[in-house]
Amino acid sequence: MASYSLFLLMALLALVTSGAVASDPALSRTSVLLTNTHQVHTSYELSFRVNGFPCKDINDVKVDDFFLAANLDKPMDTTKSKVRSNVTLINVMKLAGLNTLGISMARIDYAPLGQNPPHTHPLATEILTVLEGSLYVGFVTSNPDNKFFSKLLNKGDVFVFPQGLIHFQFNPSHDKPAVAIAALSSQNPGAITIANAVFGSNPPIADDLLAKAFQVDKKAVDWLQAQFWEDNHN
Ligand SMILES: *[C@@H]1O[C@H](CO)[C@@H](O)[C@H](O)[C@H]1NC(C)=O
């Protein structure tokens, strides 16, 4: 009798924990470096519902759950962005079959002198290849070293941005566009663009606080906040 109820308990435990095992490892994992971001990065809240996306019965799964006519071979419009780039991310919101698979991808278009500004994917590593043009890329390691690694990439080169670190890409050409394809180790990597998050938050962070934090005049902070308020909320 006792062993029978033990068996039942273990079966129940297996059932309860299987959801966690099947979820995106990047969403379930706790990161030593990034504990502070857990409360504010909405992706993590999704993990309670197996990343927030339905797990279909196998009989309801169709091939198109794993397919997207994404037109990733087509150039994207870079003229509307102030930084002259356009990120087309194929994540689980666009391709349902990515759920629980821990991967996504992006096409990134850069106008001449365009950039994908300093940003982080708290729980995703990113590997990138250059399809057209060249890119100056870099990332900075965590405190206290803040070591900067950078490299000029040519067509066909591959670079990896380690999980959680602040990184960027810049097209140094004055006349040629650049194109990159990236893969990210999360079905929903999210992104925190540093300038937009710090200077464009809603509501704004107090300007005297940021003036002290960035060791600049309050007027410089007010100017930045006006720029990024417009970018983020208009
Ligand atoms: C990116 O390009 C697409 C297609 O050209 C366009 O619809 C979209 O508005 C662009 N996004 C930005 C942020 O410029």
Image: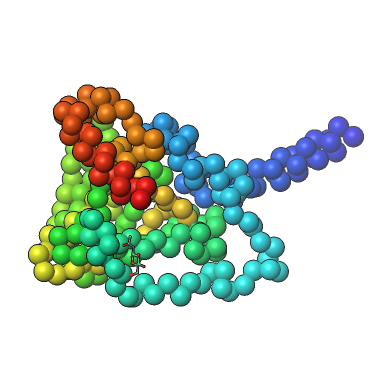
Can I make out residue 177 in this image? yes
- Residue 106, above or below 209: below
Give the number of marks. 0
Going by the picture, which residue comes out furthest to the left?
174
Residue nearest the observer in this picture, 53 or 28: 53
Q: Is residue 188 left or right of residue 192?
A: right
Asked where in the image residue 20 lies, by quadrant, the reply is top right
Going 9% across and 64% down the picture, which residue do you hit? 174
Position of residue 189 measured from the top left corner of the image (x, y, whole percent): 42, 51
Q: How is the image coloured?
A: rainbow
- Residue 95, above or below 71: above
Q: Is residue 29 left or right of residue 225?
A: right
Going 16% across and 28% down the picture, which residue do you hit? 217
Position of residue 41 measured from the top left corner of the image (x, y, whole percent): 45, 41
Asked where in the image residue 157 lies, by quadrant, the reply is bottom left
Position of residue 7 measured from the top left corner of the image (x, y, whole percent): 80, 40
Residue nearest the observer in this picture, 77 or 178: 77
Q: Is residue 167 left or right of residue 34?
A: left
Which quarter shows the N terminus?
top right
Position of residue 77 measured from the top left corner of the image (x, y, whole percent): 29, 68
Going 71% across and 46% down the picture, which residue do you hit? 15
Going 46% across and 75% down the picture, which residue do you hit? 69
Q: Quadrant of ligand 1?
A: bottom left
Asked where in the image residue 172 lies, by quadrant, the reply is bottom left
